[in-house]
Image: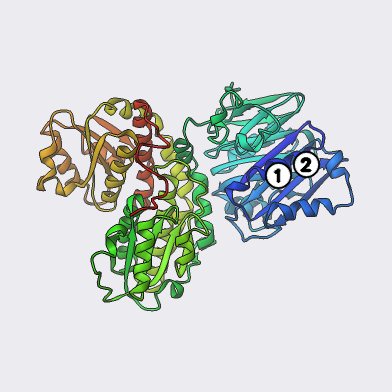
Amino acid sequence: MCGVVAVIGKQYASQFVVEGLKKLEYRGYDSAGIASLCGGILQTVKSEGKLTNLINNLSQISNANLYSDSKISIGHTRWATHGNISVENAHPLTSENRVAVVHNGIIENYENIKNNLISEGYVFKSQTDTEVLPHLFMKYIKLGNNFLQAGRLVLQEIKGAFAFVAMSLDFPNELFVSRNSSPIAIGLGDKCNFVGSDARSIDHLTQKIIYLEDGDYALVQSNDVEIFNKNEEKANRKIINIKAEIGLVTKGGYKHFMEKEIFEQPVVIPQTISPFMNGISEIKIDLNKFGFKNKNTLLIAAAGTSYYAAMVGKYWIEHIADLPVIIDLASEYRYRKPSIFGQAAMLVISQSGESLDTLMALRHGKELGLITNAIVNVEGSTIDREADFSLHTRAGSEIGVASTKSFTSQLVVLFIIALALGKKFKNFKLSQIQKYSNYIHTLPSAIARMLNMENEIKSVAHNIKNAKSIIFLGRGLLYPLALEGALKLKEISYIHAEGFAAGEMKHGPIALIEDQVPVIMFLVSDGNEDKAISNLQEAFSRGAQIILIADKECIKKAPFAHFKIEIPNFETDFKYFLSPILMAIPAQLLAYHVANERGTDVDQPRNLAKSVTVE
């Protein structure tokens, strides 16, 4: 994940920024850079690769004032999203050598903004979405606005999930900071202040931290911090003493790692997408390496949450590519003498890359002569090393045992694989592939909108926290989400929960229904919603407490539901095809808030481990 550090009002600011960037190396990155104001000049130094390269470049600069005279500096570690790995694409990005910006996340409407700015004479030197930010600041400063006013005008133009810090030669004692669905912290000092992606990046400089809330922006000066909410009203945010609350240092102000990781998803998804898509529709997956010179059956093996991701992948690949998919539990695969008739390739999915049952399934597939592929989050893990071809989700470190951002990033990779196969075998028209590729790039803001449902989810969580058993239902693409929702809930709240395909209720599970048993259904308008609501009605008539998480159209058709949580309005096709990713958010939030209400150990639930290294 990308990282941001900024210092204002402190001598040797650049050195302290570099120290902060070192603390963000754990996130993973492929380039780095800093910008400083000294002697009336904006100086920028950037490099590809590790921080040592940046530090070496800094040490070779003859003008030592970069270190000694600067009292304002911003820095960044970048994980490439828009544009390849290069010095030109590394942050900070500048405009006319007067404005510099460092940025995490994605500016979704950057192409339209970029075209407008080019028509106004602005010159772009990078392939990034970020570069529109310094140019927009420059534009509004030239029109006579102060830095705060310019920042407000910039925010009115941009859309997406982001956090950024800007500085300007015209306002050398100010930083403009903004957060929208991407975490950022402001540290308070004595006649100096600091900004970081999390408290860890600036805890060498301060113990007093303010976390901006979603939609907040701030004007940071040496002696003052003014924070405003999305309505442009001044806002007071809590000051946290990170020495007293040391557990928050790496949790970004969240109570648990799981909560933090749920809310990181709008930032994580662009990093997952980037290696596999060039621009809008060019998909960069070598399907020959993947084992698909010809159209063959694909075997996917996985366990736990990754198995449910595989189930969703089966729906997508068969629909988009018309290619048969077999799903196997990794722990069962090598013990059942599997046939590989019609198969050429095997795909295993593992967050840690160390799950022993998945590793053994991969080894068995290799013994049988299959080309082996892996979707993993941890580069260099055993599965990553042993697979013939690996696809990395690049979700960053996931500390909570219950998988959240790893699950959604796995789904994104599976959807891109489906598109690549559909394009190769010409099952979908190119215009359809283009449309679905566009959907992928709008996922971060869609996920951010789903996260805004948190308060409604909290209310439901409070209501069901004492239930002894809970049933989850789904149909089609959302059947695996019912299984995943039940798994999330049971593993961290310790409430018995089961997921079922809604149509299977009458084939046995309906016997479990008794008075006030919560029945939770994920539903979107896909042409089959009437059948699903009929299944839900069967549970209602037997005394179940019905909780419907659905779009507006479905909610209208189920007035009998006790709790109705309406998801945001999305384009119909987008909502249907990407519903497993969208609905993963309320499933995760519900599990988290039920567990939090019950006071269980959310991040380290009993009897579970992050990486399963036994069969």
Residue 27 sits above or below residue 313 on the image: above
Q: Is residue 460 above or below residue 345?
A: above
**Residue at the farthest bottom position:** 294
Q: Residues within 10 Å of mark 2 (few under 14, many from 20)?
A: many
Image location of residue 278, percent across then percent down? 54, 63
Along the polypeptide, which appears first: circle 2 or circle 1?
Answer: 2
| Front-most of residues 500 and 174 | 500
Q: What residue do we see at 74% from left, 28% from top?
A: 221
* Percent coordinates x, y for residue 408 in the rendering: 41, 49
Residue plotted at (67% across, 35% down): 202
Q: Which residue is mark 1?
A: 75
Mark 1 packing: few (<14 Cα in 10 Å), some, or many (20+)?
A: many
Q: At label 1, which amino acid type do we have? A: Gly
The answer, for residue 591, to whether it is visible in the render is yes
Structure colour scheme:
rainbow
User: Which label belongs to residue 14?
Assistant: 2
* Total residue callouts: 2
Residue 223 is tagged as none
Q: Nearer the viewer, residue 287 or 241?
A: 241
Q: Residue at x 70, y 38 (%)?
A: 6
Asked which quadrant contains residue 447, the reply is top left
User: Which amino acid type is shown beneath numbered disc 2?
Assistant: Ser
SS assignment at label 2? helix
Q: 348 or 520: which is nearer to us?
A: 348
Give the residue drawn at x 78%, y 41%. Answer: 14
489 with respect to 49 (left or right): left
Residue 537: image x %, image y %?
14, 38
Q: Is residue 247 left or right of residue 417?
A: right
